[in-house]
C-alpha cells in the first residue's frame, strides 16, 4: 500500500529560510540545510524548497542550496520558484533536486511542461497551481503570489499540464494559505478526481485533523504544510501517528505502537546540537 | 570498490553522497580502464528506456560491461531505469536491453481495476521480500522505499524476483540472477533503508 507523504515546505529568500524553523534547537534557525537535516531526522517523507524571490541573479544560491541539502538528506527534494525553462530544470536536477516545480511559467506557456517532461521524464516535473475560489465549485488560477488573476480554470489547467507531461500537481488554495483554517477540500477533491497523477494538497493547515481531511475528503496523495511544523506546534511523528489512527497508511519512522511520538524530534534535536 | 557507471544518465550524486557518508570505496567513471579496477558496479538510470539505452551504447561501455559481468562475474546493481536496462527489452521503447536477466519491462497495468491508482507510482511503499534476496538483510520492509516509476521489470522466471510491491496488485520491484541485481525503487532516496541496502551490496561476497 502506497503511503501518504507528509512534506514540510520551506520558503527560502536569498538562501535563508523565511521566518526560520523553530521546532528543534537549531544553531541557525534560518539555515535551510540545517532545517532540512532536522526534518530528515524527524522522519519527513520529502522536502520542498520554494524560492520566493527568485531572480536571475540569485539562482546560484539555490543551486548551491540543492547540492548541500542533497549531500545530507537522503529523501526526495523538490525545488520551485522562478523556474522558467528546461535549462532551469536541468540545472536544478544536476545540483541535487529530485523534482522541479513550475508555476507562473507553466501558466504563461504550458508547452514548457511538455518540453521539460520529454527531456527529463514526467517523474521529475511538478506543476504548482495557486487557485482562488471565484464562485462555488469554480476556481481560478492566480499568479505572482496570488495577486494576479488569469481567468484560467484551475481544474482544466491541471488536466492540461498533466496531458503535457506533469508528473505531479502541487495544489495551493490561495483562499486558505496562511489562514490555518484547513485545506480547500472541494478544490482538492475536484483536481484529484480530474487528473491521473498524484496531487499534493497545500495551503491552510492549522491542525492534524486538516492533514487527515486532505487525504480522506480531498483525495490528495500527499500533504504539504509549513507553519504547524516549523513553529513546533506538532512534530512529523505526531502528524504520522494521527494519520495512522485515522486509517491512512503512512511511513512510520518510530515503532507504530507504544512509542512516544516526541522521540524522533528529540533525537533530531540532539543530533543538531 | 564500487564502480558507478558514468554514461551521462544524470543524477548520480545522490548515490555518491550515500557511499561517501558510509565510507564505501567507489569511483565514478566512464573510462573502461578505470572501471576495470572496480570489483562491482552500480548502473544508474533516469528517464525513458530508449534514450537511456542509446546513451549507454554511445558511451562504448556495453562491451566492457558484458565482459566484466558475464565473463568475469562481477556483481552489478541496476537502479530504476538502470534495472530496466538489464532486461531483454521494454514496452517503453524499441531497443533491445542488455538481456542479463530474462524478461521484459512493462507498463503498470491498472486498466482492470475499479479505482485505478495514479501513475507514476510515486512515493514510499512497503516492500514484500520473497525471502531469498541477498541484499535485504536488516531492511525494515514495512517502512519501505521511495518509488518513482510507471514501468516495471516482468522477469521471465518468477524465481528471480526477490521483492514485490503492492500497487494495484503485486508488482515485481527487485530481481536477482546470480551476480546481477536490479531494483525499481531508489535506495539513494530511501533514508536508512536505502543506506543499509547499498551497504549490503558493497559487502556482498
Image (cartoon, coloured by chain):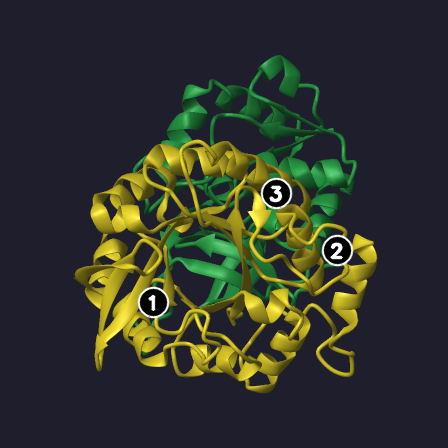
Chain colours: A yellow, B green
Q: Are marks 1 and 3 on the same chain?
A: no
Q: Secondary structure at mark 2?
A: loop
Residue B148 appears at what percent x and percent y?
A: 47, 54
Vertical placement of B176 versus A203: above or below? above
Question: Where is mark 1, residue-wise?
Answer: B110
Q: Earlier in the sequence, mark 2 or mark 3?
A: 2
Is A127 on the left-hand or right-hand side of A238? left
Q: CA distance from mark 1 to mark 3?
A: 33 Å
Q: For residue A196, which quarter of the picture?
A: bottom left
Q: Residue at x 73, y 71 (%)?
A: A254
Q: Is B64 on the left-hand or right-hand side of A164?
A: right
Residue of label 2: A26
Label 2, label 3: how far apart the Cα atoms are: 19 Å
Instruction: Identify the mark at residue A70; answer none if there is no mark.
Output: 3
Q: Of tags 2 and 3, which is closer to the observer?
A: 2
Residue A162 horizontal/vertical position (percent): 27, 56
* Viewer-proximal residue among A264 and B69: A264
Percent across and percent down for residue B182 are 56, 45
- The quarter of the rendered structure image containing the C terminus of chain B is top right
Please, what secondary structure does the residue beneath circle 3 have? helix
Q: Is residue B153 visible?
A: yes
Residue at the location (41% across, 72% down)? A220
Q: Please give the chain letter of the residue carrying mark 1.
A: B
| Nearer mark to the viewer, of 2 and 1 | 2
Q: Position of residue B133 (x, y in %)?
A: 67, 54
Kindly state the secondary structure of the residue where label 1 is placed.
loop
> Based on the displayed image, in which of its 4 quarters is residue A236 positioned?
bottom right
Q: Chain of mark 3?
A: A
Amino acid at each position: 500500500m502506497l503511503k501518504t507523504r507528509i512534506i514540510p515546505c520551506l520558503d527560502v529568500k536569498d538562501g535563508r529560510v523565511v521566518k526560520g524553523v523553530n521546532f528543534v534547537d537549531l544553531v541557525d534557525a534560518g539555515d535551510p540545510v540545517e532545517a532540512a537535516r532536522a526534518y530528515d531526522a524527524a522522519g519527513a517523507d520529502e522536502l520542498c524548497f520554494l524560492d520566493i524571490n527568485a531572480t536571475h541573479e540569485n539562482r546560484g544560491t539555490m543551486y548551491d542550496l540543492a547540492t548541500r541539502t542533497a549531500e545530507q538528506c537522503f529523501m526526495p527534494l523538490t525545488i520551485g520558484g522562478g523556474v522558467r525553462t528546461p535549462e532551469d530544470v536541468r540545472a536544478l536536477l544536476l545540483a541535487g533536486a529530485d523534482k522541479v516545480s513550475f508555476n507562473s511559467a507553466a501558466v504563461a506557456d504550458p508547452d514548457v511542461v511538455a518540453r521539460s517532461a520529454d527531456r527529463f521524464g514526467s517523474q521529475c516535473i511538478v506543476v504548482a497551481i495557486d487557485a482562488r475560489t471565484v464562485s462555488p465549485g469554480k476556481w481560478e488560477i492566480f499568479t505572482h503570489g496570488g495577486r494576479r488573476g488569469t481567468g484560467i480554470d484551475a481544474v482544466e489547467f491541471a488536466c492540461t499540464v498533466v496531458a503535457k507531461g506533469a508528473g505531479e500537481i502541487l495544489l495551493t488554495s490561495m483562499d486558505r494559505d496562511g489562514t490555518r483554517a484547513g485545506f480547500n477540500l472541494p478544490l482538492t477533491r475536484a483536481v484529484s478526481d480530474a487528473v491521473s497523477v498524484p496531487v499534493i494538497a497545500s495551503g491552510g493547515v492549522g491542525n492534524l485533523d486538516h492533514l487527515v481531511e486532505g487525504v480522506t475528503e480531498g483525495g490528495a496523495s500527499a500533504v504539504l504544510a509549513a507553519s504547524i511544523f516549523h513553529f513546533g506546534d506538532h512534530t512529523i511523528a505526531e502528524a504520522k501517528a494521527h494519520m495512522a489512527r485515522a486509517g491512512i497508511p503512512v511511513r512510520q519512522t518510530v515503532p507504530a505502537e507504544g512509542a512516544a511520538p516526541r522521540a524522533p524530534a528529540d533525537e533530531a534535536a540532539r543530533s543538531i546540537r | 570498490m564500487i564502480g558507478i557507471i558514468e554514461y551521462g544518465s544524470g543524477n548520480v550524486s545522490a548515490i555518491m553522497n550515500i557511499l561517501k557518508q558510509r565510507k564505501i570505496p567507489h569511483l565514478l567513471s566512464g573510462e573502461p580502464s578505470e572501471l576495470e579496477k572496480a570489483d562491482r558496479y552500480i548502473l544508474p538510470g533516469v528517464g525513458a528506456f530508449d534514450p537511456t539505452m542509446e546513451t549507454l551504447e554511445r558511451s562504448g561501455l556495453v562491451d566492457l560491461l558484458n565482459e566484466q559481468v558475464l565473463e568475469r562475474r562481477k556483481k552489478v546493481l541496476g537502479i530504476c531505469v538502470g534495472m530496466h536496462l538489464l532486461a531483454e527489452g521494454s514496452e517503453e521503447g524499441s531497443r533491445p536491453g542488455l538481456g542479463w536477466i530474462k524478461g521484459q519491462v512493462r507498463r503498470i497495468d491498472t486498466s482492470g481495476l475499479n479505482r485505478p491508482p495514479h501513475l507514476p507510482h510515486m512515493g514510499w511503499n512497503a516492500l514484500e521480500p520473497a525471502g531469498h534476496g541477498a541484499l535485504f538483510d536488516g531492511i525494515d520492509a514495512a517502512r519501505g522505499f521511495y518509488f518513482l516509476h510507471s514501468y516495471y521489470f516482468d522477469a521471465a522466471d518468477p524465481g528471480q524476483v526477490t521483492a514485490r510491491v503492492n500497487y494495484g496488485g503485486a508488482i515485481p520491484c527487485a530481481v536477482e540472477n546470480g551476480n546481477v541485481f536490479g531494483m525499481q525503487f531508489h535506495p539513494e532516496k530511501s533514508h536508512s533503508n536505502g543506506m543499509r541496502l547499498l551497504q549490503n551490496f558493497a559487502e556482498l561476497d
